[in-house]
Image (cartoon, helix red, strand yellow):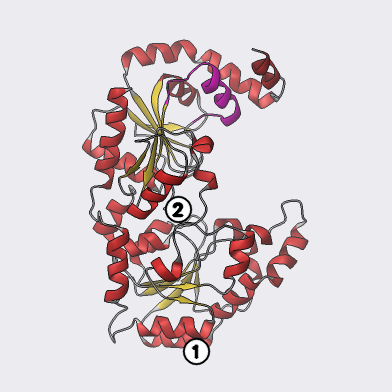
């Protein structure tokens, strides 16, 4: 009780309003729970509806319309359908009510389907303790697992997208037996069904936490970014006229998709060749990956989606030591040993490797890397959502 009182002292005005909403919706939630059994709530981000949560929700509505499954999304977002009674506006009265009446909470990112985070965290710790938490994940883990450990996530089902990841998480992340499951990621069903060749190369690197000073000014962060090897290498690639001439000659273009954490720096790329298409915020990364001809990335886990489709890729590791020291430590996946494409350290080698994939008509993966893809994904089909559903249902029925 003393711990609870100390925690309540930390509450702010917004938290008090949220607590009142929980009180006001308590009775309606109780009535709702008697009418609708075993409610499942799914969320990605407050404004997100394109990743594993969304794909799984759509699959559930199509294949199990009898289930009480609801997707939480901020009203006003383009994908929010007012005519879909199974979509609930984030932090609305209805959200608070369904939250209290729910049994299963399914998240695709670190954000669970709570109407408010801090107050609901206390509520779940002291009152609503029987929630079944499912973590669909945003992507496959490739580096350190600190953020995925059981004491951090506290989920009943941790979904893995590949066999080596499953083995690593199960053995190293502290989960009880049976809590980690290799089902494949929900969106992988989409990849096999809808992949195409859009005649473009996608350049999509991840970010670097050490470039951004959270307490620094915008001017200082801009300076840090301009002086970084990240900016210098990608700015050079995107302004390489000879390479872009080559792509144009074979009927392909280049698209550059900067990480969301670095979107604030996009205006600093002043020398980009005008033929390079800059991917704008709000564009579906999922759609881009499905239609790219070849991927250029550094350490971003999006390459697993491309590997699942057996498409060619090149890893550009111009700052490997710095990245491992200052951003993410190395995990079970060693790029040179396990990567589904060649690792390069210079722009010249990068371009040579890209050209080597072209067979005169299109970019084609080679047998060596296709075998690595097959080894990493021993289960390779479009039944990932079905396996996830069966896993959740088994937990729900036995707990």
Up the image or down, 102 lies above or below 165; here it is above
Instruction: State the image coordinates of residue 349 (x, y, percent, origin top left).
Output: 48, 84
Where does residue 318 sit, x and y in percent of width and height? Answer: 57, 74
Residues drawn in magenta: 114-131
Residues at circles 1 and 2 in contact by the CB criterion of under 8 Å: no
Spatial distance from mark 1 to mark 2, Cα to Cα? 35 Å
Q: Toward which corner of the image does residue 391 lie, by quadrant? A: top left
Mark with earlier residue (1, 2):
2
Classify mark 2: residues with Cα within 10 Å, few (<14), some (14-19) or many (20+): many
Q: Nearer the viewer, residue 162 or 7?
A: 162
Query: Is residue 143 something that shows in the picture?
Result: yes
**The C terminus sits in image quarter:** top left
Q: Is residue 128 magenta?
A: yes
Frontmost of labels 1 and 2 is 2
Left or right of 140 on screen, residue 298: right
The correct choice, above or below, for 98 with respect to 284 in the image is above
Residue at the image position 43 percent from the left and 20 percent from the top: 130
Q: Which residue is identified by label 2?
A: 141
Disc 1 crowd rating (10 Å Cα; few below 14, some 14-19, many 20+) is few
Which residue lies at the image location 49% right of the left edge and 15% below the top edge?
25
In what element is the residue under mark 1?
helix
17 vs 345, left or right, is right
Instruction: Say if residue 195 shows up in the picture.
Output: no
Q: Looking at the picture, does residue 93 appear above or below residue 367? A: above
Q: Nearer the viewer, residue 324 or 55?
A: 324
* Relative depth, front residue between 386 and 219: 386
State the image coordinates of residue 326 (x, y, percent, origin top left). Answer: 64, 60
Residue 242's disc number: 1
Q: Quadrant of the N terminus?
A: top right
Dot 2: element? loop
């Amino acid at each position: 009780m003393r711990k609870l009182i100390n925690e309540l002292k930390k509450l702010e005005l917004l938290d008090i309003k949220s607590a009142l909403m929980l009180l006001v919706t308590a009775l309606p939630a109780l009535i709702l729970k008697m009418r609708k059994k075993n409610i499942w709530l799914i969320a990605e981000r407050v404004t997100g509806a394109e990743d594993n949560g969304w794909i799984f929700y759509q699959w559930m509505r199509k294949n199990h319309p009898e289930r009480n499954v609801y997707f939480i999304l901020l009203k006003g977002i383009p994908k929010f359908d007012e005519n879909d009674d199974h979509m609930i506006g984030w932090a609305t009265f209805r959200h608070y009510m369904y939250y209290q009446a729910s049994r299963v909470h399914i998240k695709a990112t670190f954000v669970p389907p709570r109407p408010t985070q801090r107050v609901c965290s206390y509520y779940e710790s002291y009152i609503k303790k029987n929630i079944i938490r499912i973590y669909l994940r945003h992507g496959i883990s490739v580096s350190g697992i600190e953020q995925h450990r059981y004491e951090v996530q506290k989920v009943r089902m941790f979904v893995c997208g590949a066999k080596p990841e499953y083995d690593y998480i199960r053995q190293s992340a502290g989960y009880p037996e049976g809590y980690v499951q290799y089902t494949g990621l929900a969106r992988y069903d989409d990849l096999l069904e809808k992949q195409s060749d859009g005649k473009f190369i996608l350049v999509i690197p991840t970010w670097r936490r050490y470039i951004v000073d959270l307490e620094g000014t915008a001017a200082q962060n801009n300076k840090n970014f301009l002086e970084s090897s990240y900016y210098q290498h990608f700015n050079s690639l995107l302004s390489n006229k000879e390479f872009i001439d080559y792509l144009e000659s074979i009927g392909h273009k280049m698209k550059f998709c900067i990480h969301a954490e670095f979107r604030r720096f996009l205006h600093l790329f002043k020398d980009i060749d005008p033929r390079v298409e800059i991917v704008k915020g709000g564009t579906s990364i999922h759609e881009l990956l499905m239609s790219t001809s070849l991927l250029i990335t550094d350490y971003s886990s999006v390459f697993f989606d491309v590997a699942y489709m057996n498409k060619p890729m090149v890893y550009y590791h111009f700052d490997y030591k710095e990245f491992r020291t200052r951003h993410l430590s190395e995990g079970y996946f060693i790029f040179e040993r396990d990567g589904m494409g060649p690792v390069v350290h210079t722009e010249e080698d990068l371009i040579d490797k890209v050209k080597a994939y072209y067979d005169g008509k299109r970019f084609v993966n080679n047998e060596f890397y296709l075998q690595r893809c097959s080894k990493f994904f021993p289960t390779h089909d479009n039944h990932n959502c079905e396996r996830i559903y069966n896993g959740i249902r088994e937990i729900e029925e036995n707990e």
